[in-house]
Image (cartoon, grey):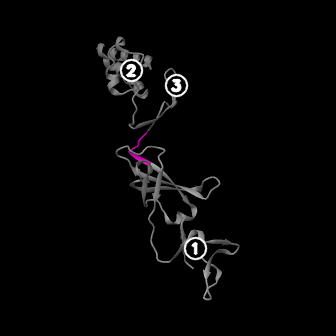
C-alpha cells in the first residue's frame, strides 16, 4: 500500500509538471484506481501531495456504518487478502428467533404481525413481523425456528437478549379442556367424561388448536 501511494504521488507530479501531460493521464488514473481498490477514500488520495508527507500508517475506513460485534485481529497481525478484521452489524433492525412446535406452524405465516416482550426491559412490548419460517426441525426436537424482524431505532435491543413472543390467531368458539386432561392411547387421544349415571368413562376425541396449557376439542 505504501508503495502504491508513492507511485500515485510520482504520477501526480509528472502530470502536473510535464507540458505534454496528456500522456501521463492514464498512468495517473491507474495509480489512483489502485488506491481506491485498496479501500482508500477520495479525500485521503487528494491529500497526498509529496512523497515526504506520506506515512507508513494508513487509516482504512469502513464502507458501512454500524456496531462492532467482534474484533478478529489485533495490532501486529499479518493480514492476508480477505482476512476479517472486524464484524460490523447494523442494529437499526434486529432479528429475533422464536421456537415454534411443528404442529403450530399452520397458525403462523411469513408477513404476520407478532408481539415481542423483551425481558431485559421489564417485558417491554414491541411489534415485529415474521420474516422467515425454517422448514427444518432442530436436532432431536419437534421445533422449528421462526425469524422475526423488529425495528430498533434507539439501538436498545442487543444480540443475546431473551424475548417472549405472542402470536394472535383467529378465534373460534368450542370446547376447551386443560392440556393435562388429554390421554394418549393406542387408538388416539381420549379424555375421561362423566356419564349420566355419575360414573366416568373414556371417550376418544379429536384435538384442534392446543398449547402447553389448554386444548380445543373439535369432535
Q: CA distance from mark 1 to mark 3?
A: 60 Å
Residue 149: say if magenta: no
For the point 62% across and 88% down, the residue is 197
From the image, which quarter does the C terminus lie in?
bottom right
Which residue matches tag 1?
207
Q: Mark 1 falls on what kind of element?
A: strand
Image location of residue 154, percent across then percent down = 34, 44
* Residue nearer the viewer, 44 or 69: 69
Q: Which mark is residue 27?
A: 2
Q: Which mark is residue 42?
A: none
Quarter where residue 55 is shown: top left
Q: Are marks 2 and 1 in contact (CB under 8 Å)?
A: no
Q: Mark 3 falls on what kind of element?
A: loop
Q: Is residue 47 above or below residue 86?
A: above
Which residue matches tag 3?
79
* Residue nearer the viewer, 186 or 20: 186
Q: CA distance from mark 2 to mark 1?
A: 77 Å
Estimate how packed mark 2 is, as few (under 14), some (14 to 19) or many (20 or more) residues with alpha carbons within 10 Å: some
Q: Are marks 3 and 2 in contact (CB under 8 Å)?
A: no
View extreme (bottom): residue: 197
Quarter where residue 136 is shown: bottom right
* Residue nearer the viewer, 89 or 101: 101
View extreme (right): residue: 186
Mark 2 or 1, closer to the camera = 1
Mark 3 or 2, closer to the camera = 3
For the point 42% across and 25% down, the residue is 34
Q: Is residue 181 above or below residue 51?
A: below
N-term mark: 1 or 3? 3
For the point 61% across and 59% down, the residue is 142
Q: Which residues are magenta?
A: 89-94
Amino acid at each position: 500500500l505504501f508503495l502504491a501511494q508513492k507511485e500515485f504521488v510520482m504520477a501526480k507530479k509528472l502530470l502536473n509538471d510535464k507540458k505534454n501531460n496528456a500522456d501521463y493521464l492514464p498512468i495517473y488514473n491507474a495509480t489512483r484506481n489502485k488506491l481506491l481498490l485498496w479501500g482508500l477514500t477520495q479525500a485521503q488520495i487528494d491529500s497526498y501531495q509529496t512523497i515526504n508527507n506520506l506515512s507508513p500508517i494508513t487509516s482504512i475506513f469502513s464502507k458501512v456504518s454500524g456496531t462492532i460485534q467482534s474484533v478478529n485481529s489485533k495490532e501486529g497481525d499479518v493480514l492476508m487478502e480477505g482476512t476479517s478484521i472486524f464484524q460490523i452489524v447494523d442494529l437499526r433492525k434486529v432479528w429475533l428467533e422464536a421456537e415454534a412446535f411443528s404442529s403450530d406452524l399452520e397458525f403462523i405465516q411469513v408477513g404476520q404481525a407478532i408481539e415481542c416482550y423483551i425481558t431485559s426491559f421489564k417485558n417491554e412490548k414491541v411489534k415485529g413481523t415474521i420474516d422467515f419460517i425454517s422448514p427444518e426441525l432442530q436436532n432431536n426436537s419437534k421445533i422449528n425456528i421462526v425469524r422475526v424482524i423488529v425495528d430498533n431505532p434507539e439501538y436498545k435491543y442487543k444480540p443475546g437478549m431473551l424475548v417472549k413472543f405472542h402470536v394472535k390467531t383467529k378465534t373460534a368458539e368450542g370446547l376447551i379442556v386443560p392440556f393435562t386432561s388429554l390421554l394418549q392411547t393406542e387408538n388416539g387421544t381420549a379424555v375421561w367424561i362423566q356419564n349420566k349415571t355419575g360414573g366416568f368413562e373414556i371417550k376418544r376425541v379429536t384435538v384442534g388448536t392446543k398449547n402447553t396449557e389448554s386444548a380445543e376439542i373439535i369432535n
